[in-house]
Amino acid sequence: MRTPERLAGGDAGNGRPGRVRKDPPKPLAAPPHHRLRRAAPEPDRPPRRGIRVRRRRRAAEGWRYHPARPATSEHRDPELTENPDEAASAPTSVDTTVPHSARVWNYWLGGKDNYAVDREVAEEFRKVFPEISDFARQGRGFLKRAVAYLADEAGIRQFLDLGTGMPTAANTHEVAQAHAPESTVVYVDNDPLVLAHATALLVGAPEGRTDYLHADLRRPEAVLEAAAKTLDFDRPVALLLMGVLGHIPEDEAPGIVARLVEALPSGSHLALWDGTDTDPRGNEALRQYNETAPLPYWTRSPEWIASLFDGLDPVEPGLVPCPQWRPETPEVGAGQYGASLCGVGRKP
């Protein structure tokens, strides 16, 4: 028999049946990880079926449901995290009226991430040094062969690429993970323009990992501290410095490289290439470029570049121009050996 509390519309005293009274539904609270943002009401929008009572009520009051987006750490910036004022003043837009070295280099490599002002500067440089595009591709070819050697023959599974520049063909993670899918690659650059393209650098093999750090190579301690969150410095690491040291003053670069190598364990490798001051036309083209460049580049003597490998065991064939380091097939422009020097050294 139904209890009096559950009867409505009948005589509870004589037990005559009535209809069952249903308790009003209790509102369902939104989970704590949801957030609500006020938005303009949309009276013409038909209600969705199955929406929960609380969300329907909120929608009627002018709220719209948005799931919370979890915070990510892929674009960690040790410098800006520690100094909010610097983060607030960081550039948020790309100035297409001023040439940018990364975009100029991208144009020489045949990329499309450049603007008219970059192409104009690049072509002026080419008038003085016509082989500049071959020179750029030769440096990229060395990176590809060096990373393949490190992954295949040296057994390296961790790569720290400093001054990575804008994504183009044969990026470090693409080469490393093609040979060893479980490889971990950390890119480092302090250029806001590169940061804007970092998502293209973070798409790698599912077995491996890629990360990007917005940090300054000239502060090696900060770079190492941030990279240690991804890399295991108890295992060998390949340190890559591909054509980047020319942007750093000559008296500062050796100390930076020495500090970085010092932090690496035995069995780690240094792979490096840079331009040399042995071609008068290249020197003149750079002199003209540096007069207006926001980020100048200086070539160095072969002896200066060789000194960066002090204390490391050279990998054959030693220090040579980029096209001569373990060539696989004839490269575009390989016959015109540019003024460059490259090598790979192993830390004993």
Image: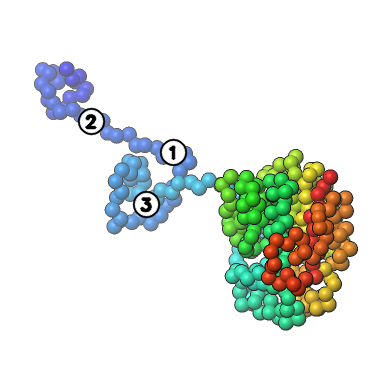
Name the mark on residue 62: 3
Q: Which label number is shown at residue 22? A: 2
Mark 1 or mark 3, earlier in chain: 1
Q: Quadrant of residue 172?
A: bottom right
Residue 101 appears at what percent x and percent y? 70, 69
Mark 1 or 3, closer to the camera: 1
- Which corner quadrant holds the C terminus? top right
Q: Are marks 3 and 2 in contact (CB under 8 Å)?
A: no
Is label 3 in a helix, a strand or a loop?
loop
Q: Marks 1 and 2, how far apart in space?
A: 26 Å
Counting residues from the start of the chain, the first of labels 3 and 2 encountered is: 2
* Front: mark 1 or 2: 1
Q: Amino acid at mark 3?
A: Gly
Please name whichever residue, 140 or 35, is drawn nearer the observer in this view of the structure. Answer: 140
Residue 245 locus on image (x, y percent): 79, 62
Q: Position of residue 85 (x, y in %)?
A: 68, 56
Q: Is residue 215 above or below residue 290?
A: above
Question: Which residue was labeled with disc 1?
Answer: 31
Determine crowd level at label 3: few under 14, some 14-19, many 20+ residues with C-alpha closer than 10 A.
some
Circle nearer the N terminus (1, 2) = 2
User: What type is the residue that disc 2 sits on?
Assistant: Lys
Q: Is residue 23 left or right of residue 300?
A: left
Q: Residue at x 85, y 50 (%)?
A: 312
The residue depicted at 64 percent of the width and 48 percent of the height is: 180
The amino acid pointed to by label 1 is Pro
Q: Check disc 1: other Cα within 10 Å, few if <14, some if 14-19, many if 20+.
A: few
Displayed quadrant of residue 306: bottom right
Q: Is residue 103 visible?
A: no
